[in-house]
Structures are given as structure tokens and as C-alpha cells.
Image (cartoon, rainbow, N blue to C red):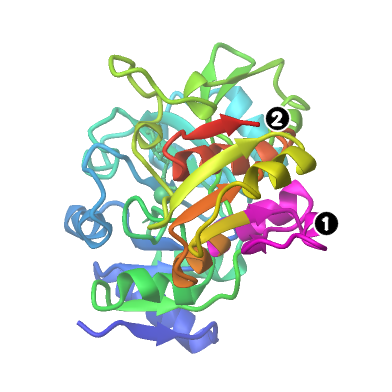
């Protein structure tokens, strides 16, 4: 099946919605990363999503809806706090884990009795949900394990001949996947996966915002992941990625001892001047780093990088999301200099 590239025209948006309604899988833009969209209520379509990206069957899909008022169709016992959060953060990059209703097939929820619900803000994605009339299950549109796609071309690189179509809606605004939270008690949430809705932002509404241990470190063999996706090696390019903690000078000194033409560094823009070794940069602020990280990991592969030493982001704000993706891309290989 040759994958068709659709534009963001009204006609092509309707075509994408029609394909999803008919049970096909389509690559679609969102404000976080590109997704592989399918009708969340159609078991066969959802199975095709898992197959297209070779995703383990126990890693649940997030269900995207047009407005949080529709969450009640797919979830039950929705806490008041979820509605308060929705008022502030929906539409946007926040996924709430809720108790699922039977209408959500178990293949969509990876066998769990909960479902992740999100209301995306991307205009094209919103139109596709409305026009298709379906809640849309959409995991990131990469092959499982690879960096998430932040533009239509990345989706084509991974999915050409695997799905019917990809809709080009431009480059993803945030560049990292949504913040995933679960509810604990009346006014407490737990961040299972950090994203652009940060702990600080959630604290404006919640009394307590816990950060799941799996966010910042590898789970022990016997630990159960609250978010199944967090137990898999993820976001990894072909190159061997290693996070190097330390300041600019210590990093430079360390790199000066790592030779070889396929050794690269991924550093901040402001460190590039006079940096005499192979490198790419990924912005200065955490927002820029979120926007650029996955793209740079793909570009480093294209450049033939075999080993990539990375200057990690701050863990503040959206930096926590960048750090979370980076240590997974590195298979948790972190060295301190
Ligand atoms: P992706 O679809 O690639 O953005 O990944 C979705 C993430 O959300 C994965 O880490 C999933 O494990 C997580 N997720 C989705 N649904 C649930 C759920 N019901 N409970 C816990 N985590 C979930
Ligand atoms: Mg993913």
C-alpha cells in the first residue's frame, strides 16, 4: 500500500476523516507530535495501529476527543478535579487517565480498565475528530522504539507503505508527547509522563502533584509501570546516545578525549561558537529543546553518528519532559563529568 501524502486543505482534512471513519489508519498532526489515528471504538482499526508501529499490545493508546464534555461517553466516575483541570488545560497537551467504560475495547486500553483521554488543540486534528465523528486512538506515529515524529516527513520515513495516508499539518508546536496524569484522592494527581503541561502548571489547580518514580529513572525488574509505555526503551535513534551531566567546560574537556569521526555532541546553541568537534545544537531554552530533540535525534542518524554525547536540559518546567525522553533515548546511560 503506497502511502498518500495529504495536505492541510479542507478537502484533504475531510478525506482523512473519511478514511478514519471507514476503519483505516492515518498519520495526523497534533500540537505535541504526529499521531497514528484510528477509530478508537473499532477493534480492527486499533489492531492495525499496533501492527503499523509494531507496538507491544500491553501499551495502551490515548483516546482523543473534540471536547472534554464528551469524556463521560468513554469514562466513568470522572473526578471533579478532572473537570477543573479540563477547564484550564483542555484543549491542550494533557492526558487524563480515567476509569474506562465498556464501549472502549480492551485492545485500545492495552487490557487495562482505564483509558487515557485527551482533547488536542491542533486545529486540523480537531477538525478530523469532528468530521469523522469518532473518538480517535492515536499513539505517536513512529515505529515503536524510534524517536517520535514532529513533522509529516518523519511519519513518511517510518510509515511509508504501512498506512494509507499521512496528513501534513506542519511542524508540531511542542515536540514532546502529552503530559499523562492519574488521579489519587480528591485533589492530588500523579505525573506518569511529563509534557508541556508542567508540574508547576498543575499545582495551580491541584493541592499535590506527585512525579512517578519511572519519570526520572529506570524501573527495577520487578516493578510494575503505572504507565506501561514507561517500561519500554523508547525514542532511540540508531546511534548510541549517552547523557553527559556536568557544566559546559567539563563537557568540552570530556569530549576532547572522545575521538572518532562518528562521534557527535548535542549541545546548546549558545555553546556552539568555538566548539571544534562534530556537533548539532538543540536550542537554549527547554521549550526549544522540546521542539527540537526528536528532530535532532533523527538528523544525527542521517549524519551517520554512531555515538552521541548529549548536554542534558534542566529538569525544570518542560525541561523535565525533555530529560525524560532523553534518558530513554540513551537507554538510561548517564555519565557525570
Ligand atoms: P504514545 O501513544 O506513544 O504517546 O504513548 C502513550 C502513553 O500513555 C504511553 O506511555 C502509555 O503507557 C500511556 N497510557 C495510555 N493509556 C494509559 C492508561 N490507561 N494508563 C496508564 N498509562 C496510559
Ligand atoms: Mg510514543
* Residue neighbourhood size for the residue with mark 2, other residues' Cα within 10 Å, grouped as few (<14), some (14–19), many (≥20): some
Residue with the most extreme top position: 185
Q: Residue at horizontal 40%, vertical 85%? A: 5
Q: Can residue 131 be seen? A: no
Q: Nearer the viewer, mark 1 or mark 2?
A: 1
Instruction: Give, as a single range, the part of the protein colored magenta.
Output: 266-295
Q: Residue at horizontal 65%, vertical 58%? A: 291
Mark 2 CB lies closer than 8 A to ligand 1: no
**Cα distance, mark 1 to mark 2?**
31 Å
Label 2: element kind: helix
Out of 231 and 273, give the one closest to the viewer. Answer: 273
Q: Which residue is mark 1?
A: 270
Place of residue 161 in the rendered image (x, y in percent of width and height, measured from the top left): 24, 78
The label number, if any, that marks residue 199 in the structure image = none
Q: Quadrant of the C terminus?
A: top right
* Residue neighbourhood size for the residue with mark 1, other residues' Cα within 10 Å, grouped as few (<14), some (14–19), many (≥20): few
Against 2, residue 119 (above or below) is: above
Q: Which residue is mark 2?
A: 202
Against 209, residue 140 (above or below) is: below
Label 1: element kind: helix
The reply, left or right, for residue 104 in relation to residue 296 is left
Q: Earlier in the sequence, mark 1 or mark 2?
A: 2
Place of residue 225 in the rendered image (x, y in percent of width and height, measured from the top left): 37, 24
Q: How many marks?
A: 2
Q: Residue at horizontal 44%, vertical 80%? A: 14
Q: Is residue 304 magenta?
A: no
Place of residue 208 in the rendered image (x, y in percent of width and height, measured from the top left): 68, 15
Place of residue 80 in the rendered image (x, y in percent of width and height, measured from the top left): 60, 24
Amino acid at each position: 500500500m503506497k502511502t498518500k501524502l495529504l495536505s492541510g486543505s479542507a478537502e484533504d482534512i475531510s478525506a482523512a476523516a473519511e478514511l478514519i471513519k471507514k476503519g483505516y489508519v492515518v498519520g495526523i498532526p497534533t500540537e505535541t507530535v504526529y499521531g497514528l489515528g484510528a477509530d478508537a471504538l473499532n477493534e480492527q482499526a486499533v489492531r492495525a495501529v499496533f501492527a503499523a508501529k509494531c507496538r507491544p499490545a500491553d501499551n495502551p493508546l490515548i483516546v482523543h476527543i473534540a471536547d472534554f464534555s464528551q469524556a463521560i461517553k468513554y469514562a466513568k466516575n470522572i473526578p471533579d478535579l478532572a473537570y477543573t483541570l479540563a477547564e484550564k488545560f483542555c484543549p491542550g497537551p494533557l492526558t487524563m487517565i480515567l476509569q474506562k467504560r465498556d464501549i472502549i475495547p480492551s485492545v485500545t486500553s492495552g487490557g487495562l480498565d482505564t483509558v487515557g483521554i485527551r482533547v488536542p488543540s491542533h486545529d486540523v486534528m480537531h477538525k478530523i475528530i469532528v468530521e469523522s465523528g469518532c473518538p480517535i486512538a492515536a499513539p505517536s506515529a513512529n515505529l515503536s522504539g524510534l524517536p517520535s515524529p514532529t513533522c509529516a516527513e518523519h511519519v513518511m520515513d517510518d510509515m511509508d507503505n504501512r498506512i494509507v495516508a499521512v496528513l501534513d499539518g506542519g511542524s508540531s508546536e511542542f515536540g514532546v508527547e502529552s503530559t499523562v496524569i492519574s488521579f489519587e484522592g480528591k485533589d492530588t494527581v500523579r505525573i506518569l509522563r511529563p509534557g508541556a503541561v508542567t508540574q508547576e502548571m498543575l499545582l495551580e489547580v491541584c493541592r499535590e502533584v506527585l512525579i512517578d518514580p519511572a519519570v526520572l529513572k529506570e524501573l527495577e525488574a520487578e516493578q510494575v509501570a503505572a504507565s506501561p509505555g514507561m517500561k519500554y526503551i523508547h525514542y532511540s535513534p540508531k546511534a548510541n546516545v549517552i547523557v553527559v551531566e556536568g557544566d559546559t567546560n567539563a563537557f568540552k574537556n570530556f569530549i576532547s578525549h572522545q575521538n572518532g569521526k562518528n562521534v557527535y555532541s548535542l549541545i546548546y546553541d549558545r555553546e556552539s561558537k568555538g566548539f571544534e568537534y562534530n556537533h548539532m545544537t538543540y536550542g537554549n531554552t527547554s521549550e526549544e529543546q522540546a521542539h527540537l530533540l526528536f528532530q535532532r535525534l533523527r538528523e544525527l542518524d542521517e549524519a551517520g553518528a554512531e555515538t552521541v554525547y548529549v548536554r542534558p536540559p534542566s529538569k525544570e518546567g518542560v525541561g523535565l519532559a525533555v530529560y525524560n525522553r532523553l534518558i530513554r533515548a540513551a537507554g538510561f546511560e548517564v555519565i557525570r563529568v
